[in-house]
Amino acid sequence: MNSLIKTILVISIGFNIVLLLITGYFIYQKGGTKYVVNCIGTIVGTQKNIDQSYYDERVNLFKSIPKTNKSIIFLGDSITAGCEWNELFPGYNTKNRGIGSDTTSGILCRLDEVIQAKPDKIFLMVGISDLESGRSVQEIATNYTKILEKIIKKTPETRIYIQSILPINNDKYASVFFNNEKIIDCNRELKSLSQKHNLTYIDLYPLMTSQNGQLRANLTTNGINISGEGYLIWKEAIKNYIEIK
């Protein structure tokens, strides 16, 4: 009996060691401790939480800046906020209204300030933070619809350009809530909404993917935000729409 118990214990310990080695190798391949931190942060809801004071400061700043005519507004989250649009498009009245970690709900709440000056054009990209927080594709589409309908109602002359959500690089960034397949599903809904409302849809997703369907490694440092080279690709994709009178 004792011999049988010892054999079972040895087998059990050996199995657990193998399991730990496999798990450790998987975590190592995904980025090590960074992968674990990202996953834990997402599960407990701390992953890229919006700093409320920062968010309020940005909204207050946007409200305080004088409104100008013939403006081109870039509206979205940190991916939009990370670019100097006025330098990419000199000579145009571009305004950056991106806020880090913003969602479709946040955009909807601060939309009045954006459309108050009745801008000529709005380039909209939002949704990655919604996915990151566990929001479904349908919830995102519902909020997106409200955003579009409000802009169309309040400032019907404004041209709206719906830009696809960009891919992520899973080797540098991990989430338990979404992956590129879910981003593709969301982009499919956004394209459908653009067709429904007779708006322009700009598909940036394939322009930044590698052969394995990931955000190209040379275009990102953290797997989700893009580098200067990524913004130059973005610029080339939209410049004709910027130049349209």
Image (cartoon, grey):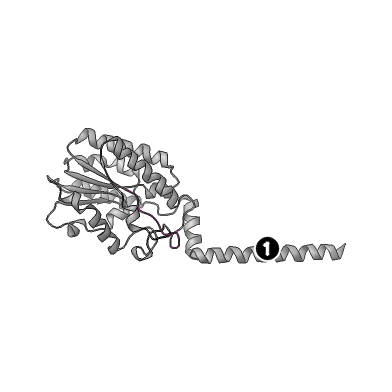
**Residue type indicated by callout 1:** Asn
Q: Position of residue 112 (x, y in %)?
A: 24, 39
Task: Give 200 or 220, whichever is nearer the viewer.
Answer: 200
- CA neighbours of label 1 inside 10 A, class few (<14), some (14 to 19), many (20+): few
Please give the name of the residue rendered at 88% of the width and 62% of the height, measured from the top-left corner.
1
Q: Quadrant of residue 2?
A: bottom right
Q: Nearer the viewer, residue 206 or 114?
A: 206
Q: Secondary structure at mark 1?
A: helix
Residue 37 visible somewhere in the drawing:
yes
Q: Is residue 100 visible?
A: no
- 186 above or below 89? above
Camera-side residue of 240 and 34: 240
| Left or right of 155 on screen, residue 196 | right
**Quick one: which residue is furthest to the front in this view?**
211
Q: Is residue 196 within the magenta segment? A: no
Q: Which residue is mark 1?
A: 16
- Give x and y (percent) for residue 210: 38, 60
Q: Give the side of residue 119 with respect to residue 213, left or right.
A: left
Q: Residue at x 40, y 56 (%)?
A: 168
Q: How many marks?
A: 1
Q: Which residues are magenta?
A: 164-173
